[in-house]
Amino acid sequence: MGVRSWWARTQVRGSERLALRLQAAFLANEDPRLLDASLVWTRRAVAYTPPDSPELAERLSTMGDVLCMRYERNHDVAGLEQALAIHRGALALVAAVPAHPHLYTVYTGLGSALSHLAQRDSDLVVMDEAIGYYRAALEDPADDPDLRAMRLVNLSHALELRCLYAADLSSLDEAIELLRTAVSLTPTGSHFYPWRASRLASAMAGRAALGGDSDPASGVTEVLDQIRAALPGALPSFAEQARILIGPLLAGPPATDAPGPETGEPTPAAVLEEVSAIVRQSDARTMAPLYQAGNVAGMLRRAAASGDPRLFDEAVATARDAVASTPDDHPFRYAVLGLLGAALGQRMEWLGRRDDLPEMVDVLRRAVAASPADDPARGGFQSDLGNALVLSFDTAGDLATLTEAVATFRAAAAALPDDFAEPGIVWTNLGGALLRLHERTSDAPALDEAIEAHHRAVASATATHVNRGMYASNLSGALSRRWRDDGDIADLDEAIRFGRLAAEAPGTPPATRPLYLGNLGEALAERGLQTGQTESLDEAVRVFREVTTLMPAGHVARPKALHMLGNALIVTGEESGATIDEAVRVLREAVAAEPVRFHAADADAQQPRPEPGAAGPARRERRPPPRGAGRAGRRSGRRRGG
């Protein structure tokens, strides 16, 4: 027994030590072979650990962490689910032992697995469970500043995501305070300091952009200055970082003389040789563009927080420099091109620089062309390119550009992997482009395909998904459009059903809900006018009243909401003078709230006159009467005439 016990302990310690060093090597090189090798040796360590050992829970948690790291790399959903099951098994082990020495380690690992799952599904319930375990890990009485800082960063990241899912600014405020504490616990000479401080700066910039900070730029600038001061001594070259992290591994085999693994598994000597070759091939020059491009995202957040045009220009210039310094055969050139496209897009959005649009389209075309067909980021670049092409179409009206946008979105949708994190965005973008194509060409199959794409977007989102309301509202609009073309009341009923789903979706941000309610109210009013259902008209009035209550004075969409409420009041209040008086008051408020652009005569003079005999695009023949032209509208006309 003594020899067997010694042999098992040797197996465990040697395997565990090699697995941890391989993980460090992966963090330096991001070569997936290192992570796969680490998983092999981690499983070996678990296999040789006695079932009653208190170390089993920690090693199970480590194996779950490696599976989560691999999920981050290749989006292996089965691996993520296995990681979650392993972490829950580790939790069951520590829960059965009072004051288990690895309790807080297991809490951290389980929180990480749940956080990954919540991000995959945008599931607020799962994210709250992850936050609960992250909070429990912070109750660790051990006085280890670096470990506590790491756990604070984990919790802050989960809270930032919760802010996005639930539109809860208090979560973002708490995340900022946790990051401040984490940065204060991190020595400025630590290689973690710049990354943690950058996270703090990004969170502060995001909070400032959302409002509520009297001087948003000053705090962010101070943190960024601290990062710049720490960078020269804190971040050696890529190759040097790799050598620092895995130097002990390259110096020789593990201290314990563990026998080789079973046939088919890599031997320690083979792994060492592979790692050594990877490090020798590391080239700081080829990694420099990625480090340079990595600063662009922070610049853009700072620019958005301050609104300073010079900062947007600086971000675009930095991204252009990164592209210029990236070799054509660089394996991640497409990522740098995609970042330049994003920088140009944000500058255009914030500053109205439509002259950036041609370059943006060109850069994103190159990013798509350079990205590997199986790269998960390719679909995102295709979606960005499709959106840029749609903007170009909206600007110039070139049908060929819109056709290219539709083809780009179709390609992105066709290449979606089964485990893609956000398929709904791709489907809803495709649906929007197809709807434009139908409006331009009256192509009925394009409208049908748009509705199918929007249906897929809704189906891809869970009940608590942050974008479910947006997907449902887009589907409702497409169905309403087909009803106007064909007059099929079933389409209008479906539009109302999905309009209600959009307005009631739990993940819908408060700022967006009034827009979804307005679309719902419009569909209800159309059904009431088409069918004579007073219940639909009365509900439309209630919905429009709620919309005007939720939209403060000065809201860009408030005049339209007031117009819709006034029109609905006129239709429903034909026999009630009080209701008509309210309609008049509301419509006067709507007119007063509208921005003054130009006189109607000027507008009429600017409209192009059709040539004699010219015909517009062919339309489907059957249409419902326009709003206000039905039975109720004619009665209103007689009342005004009398």
Image: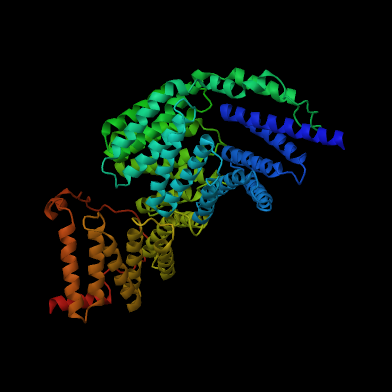
Is residue 399 in sight in this rendering? no
Q: Residue at x 43, y 35 (%)?
A: 184
Q: Residue at x 50, y 51 (%)?
A: 122
Is residue 419 in sight in this rendering? yes
* Drawn side of residue 614 relative to residue 15, left or right: left
Quadrant that contains the N terminus: top right
**Position above or below: 458 against 383:** below
The type of colouring in the image is rainbow
Nearer the observer, 543 or 537: 543
**Position above or below: 559 against 538:** above
Residue 593 percent coordinates (x, y): 18, 58
Residue 449 percent coordinates (x, y): 47, 54
Splitting the image into 4 quarters, where does residue 405 fall? top left
Splitting the image into 4 quarters, where does residue 305 fall? top left
* Drawn side of residue 402 relative to residue 123, left or right: left
Nearer the observer, 188 or 281: 188
Residue 333 percent coordinates (x, y): 48, 27
**Position above or below: 299 against 211:** above
Nearer the observer, 522 or 206: 206
Quadrant that contains the C terminus: bottom left
Residue 163 percent coordinates (x, y): 42, 50
